């Protein structure tokens, strides 16, 4: 390692230690500092690691967390960006925060990587495996089109042609471009297709020839067992498959993958997909299915993913939302709620959220009207837009309350006669609201 690289590493580690020792931590600054001194620092930091990259539109954080819990059943030290800081500076900071190496063996790193950051990190990380969770329309103001995001994923894979790609076989667009990489696919192959009947009716077009796609079975969005009658494009054979969904409730999910029963303490079909991707990644690294099952049971809901918070004896569940498909899946999950509860929606349109809020018009707010929500509170920079959307969905105007700041939201939660509160929040709103909850002692770091 050059003198410049050593200096970058030393000062980066010092800033990481200082920020985590004396403040609430800094996930980006140490990486920014180190990269300013040595733009090539990531290649030096990652040199002794076998790296797995988890990327895609939805599910990156939970897939990564599940995979890490499973992998630690075999590999005690697995480096990961558990804070969800998935851009270049945050990834560098993750390596700066790693413990010093005490043995000569290579270590394992499982990293959630933002789609837009792939091109900046792949040449340094040289990953051994990519996991592609899914691709949906999301932040098109940033990317332009879903095809542009696909280009980011395929270009990254082509740059490391020997790397395995573990991809969601149920997602048609992920199969639209060929790469020289070896592939393994995961998806749903329910023995009884009636076990999961999707009400999705939006027509999907074949990514190869643009003719309508047909489905033998459909889970949600465009995911499912698809085929094209025109060009014969179809879902690839699955190596990892969910063959039954055995139980779904707000406290968790039970299901079977490749004949092995598993459970996770989070609800929703979309989270079973995340578990399926994590199962495939852990199995790729040699973890036995029975050990994966034990690892999955150890996970707790992570940052804004069905995160449970107690506020003055109110059970608050926070879910991060950022696009129509993800929103609709959370709406389906909330349909499992049987108790009267209140709903809080906090959306911003900062760069990390996506600056175009018009996607809420495509999201299924109408189904929320059928659920036992008594009062709705809207906040963030888009409180007014949310109020209008809830009104359009049929909520009584007197039950929709725009709120000016997060402190007031907390006071309204504390004063609610309902003990169950559900929060839907955009990415930066989640960060801001959690920061306030930490400051007020309702949430630990």
Image (tube, grey):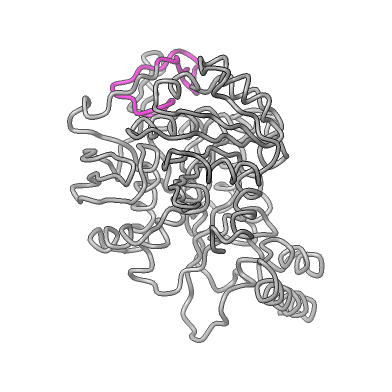
130 with respect to 263 (left or right): right
Q: Main secondary structure of the magenta part?
A: loop
- On the question of residue 164 being in view, the answer is no
Q: Tell me the magenta residue range.
A: 201-223
- The part of the image, by quadrant, that contains residue 223 is top left
126 versus 13 height, above or below: above
Q: Residue at image x 44%, y 14%?
A: 203
- Foreground residue, 179 or 426? 426
96 versus 375 height, above or below: below
- Counting from the top left corner in percent of width and height, residue 111 is at 53, 58
**In magenta segment, residue 212:** yes
256 with respect to 308 (left or right): left
How many tags in the picture? 0
Q: Residue at image x 43%, y 21%?
A: 367
Q: Residue at image x 57%, y 29%?
A: 137
The C terminus sits in image quarter: bottom right
**In magenta segment, residue 334:** no
- Counting from the top left corner in percent of width and height, residue 291 is at 27, 64
- Counting from the top left corner in percent of width and height, residue 401 is at 61, 28
- On the question of residue 23 being in view, the answer is yes
- Counting from the top left corner in percent of width and height, residue 432 is at 66, 49
The N terminus sits in image quarter: bottom right
Residue placed furthest toward the bottom: 102
- Foreground residue, 26 or 235? 26
- Foreground residue, 180 or 140? 140
């Amino acid at each position: 390692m050059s003198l410049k690289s050593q200096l970058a590493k030393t000062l980066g580690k010092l800033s990481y230690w200082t920020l985590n020792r004396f403040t609430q931590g800094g996930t980006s600054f140490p990486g920014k500092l180190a990269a300013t001194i040595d733009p090539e620092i990531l290649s030096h930091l990652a040199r002794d690691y076998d790296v797995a990259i988890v990327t895609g539109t939805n599910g990156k954080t939970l897939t990564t967390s599940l995979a890490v819990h499973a992998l630690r059943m075999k590999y005690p030290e697995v480096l990961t960006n558990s804070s969800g800081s998935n851009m270049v500076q945050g990834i560098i900071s993750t390596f700066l925060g790693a413990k010093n190496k005490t043995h000569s063996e290579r270590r394992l790193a499982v990293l959630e990587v933002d789609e837009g950051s792939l091109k900046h990190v792949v040449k340094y990380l040289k990953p051994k495996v990519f996991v592609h969770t899914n691709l949906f329309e999301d932040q098109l103001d940033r990317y332009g089109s879903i095809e542009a995001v696909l280009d980011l994923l395929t270009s990254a894979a082509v740059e490391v042609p020997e790397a395995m790609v573990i991809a969601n076989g149920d997602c048609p667009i992920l199969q639209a471009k060929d790469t020289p990489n070896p592939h393994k696919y995961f998806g749903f192959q329910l023995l009884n297709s009636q076990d999961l009947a999707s009400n999705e009716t939006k027509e999907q077009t074949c990514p190869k020839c643009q003719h309508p796609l047909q489905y033998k079975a459909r889970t949600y969005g465009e995911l499912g067992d698809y085929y094209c009658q025109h060009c014969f494009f179809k879902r690839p054979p699955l190596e990892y498959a969910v063959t039954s969904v055995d139980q779904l409730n707000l406290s968790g999910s039970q299901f079977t993958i490749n004949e092995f029963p598993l459970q996770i303490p989070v609800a929703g079909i979309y989270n079973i997909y995340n578990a399926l991707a994590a199962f495939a990644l852990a199995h790729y690294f040699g973890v036995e299915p029975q050990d994966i099952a034990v690892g999955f049971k150890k996970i707790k809901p992570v940052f804004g993913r069905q995160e449970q918070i107690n506020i003055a004896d109110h059970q608050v569940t926070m879910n991060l939302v950022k696009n129509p498909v993800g929103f609709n899946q959370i709406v389906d999950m909330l349909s499992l709620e049987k108790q009267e509860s209140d709903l809080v929606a906090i959306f911003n349109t900062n760069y990390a959220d996506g600056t175009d809020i018009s996607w809420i018009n495509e999201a299924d707010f109408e189904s929320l009207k059928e659920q036992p929500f008594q009062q709705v509170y809207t906040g963030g920079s888009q409180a007014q837009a949310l109020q209008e959307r809830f009104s359009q969905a049929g909520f009584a105007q007197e039950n929709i309350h725009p709120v000016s700041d997060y402190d007031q939201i907390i006071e309204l939660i504390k004063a609610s006669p309902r003990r169950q509160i559900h929060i839907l929040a955009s990415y930066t709103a989640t960060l801001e609201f959690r920061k306030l909850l930490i400051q007020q002692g309702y949430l630990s770091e």
